[in-house]
Image: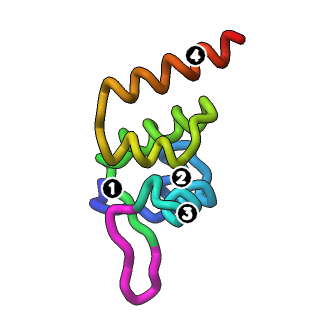
Amino acid sequence: MKDFYSVHEFSVMTGVEASTLRYWDDVGVFSPVKRDPENNYRYYSLPQITAVNFVSVLSDLNIPLKTIAELRQDRNPEEFMRILERREKQLDM
């Protein structure tokens, strides 16, 4: 087991496309744990799997990335439940 994983390795481990991981980093939704200052490569850690799964599930539910970023920042369970309930109602229609 390693401490850090490249974008490709993390992509394989999580099932999230490498291009999606790069995009999420660029828009501030999910960032790597570190970047190499010389080549700017992104590196992820195993504890980040939970966070990327959170982003991935909400993204699959078509929750806007801006909203996902706010949820990750605020960690407000009540707001999270309100968003999920609203999305559920939209899907039921």
Question: Pointer 2: residues within 10 angstroms few (<14), some, or many (20+)?
Answer: some
Q: Earlier in the sequence, mark 3 or mark 2?
A: 2
Discs 4/3, front: 4
Q: What residue is shown at x 65% (from left), y 18% (from top)?
A: 90
Residue 32 image offset from top left, x and y in percent: 39, 62
Q: Earlier in the sequence, mark 2 or mark 4?
A: 2
The residue indicated by pointer 4 is: 88
Q: Nearer the viewer, residue 86 or 72?
A: 86
- Dot 4: what SS? helix
Q: Nearer the viewer, residue 61 or 77?
A: 77
The residue indicated by pointer 2 is: 11
Discs 1/3, front: 3
Stretch in magenta: 32-41
Most prominent secondary structure in the magenta stretch?
A: loop
Residue 6 image offset from top left, x and y in percent: 45, 65
Q: Amino acid at mark 4?
A: Glu
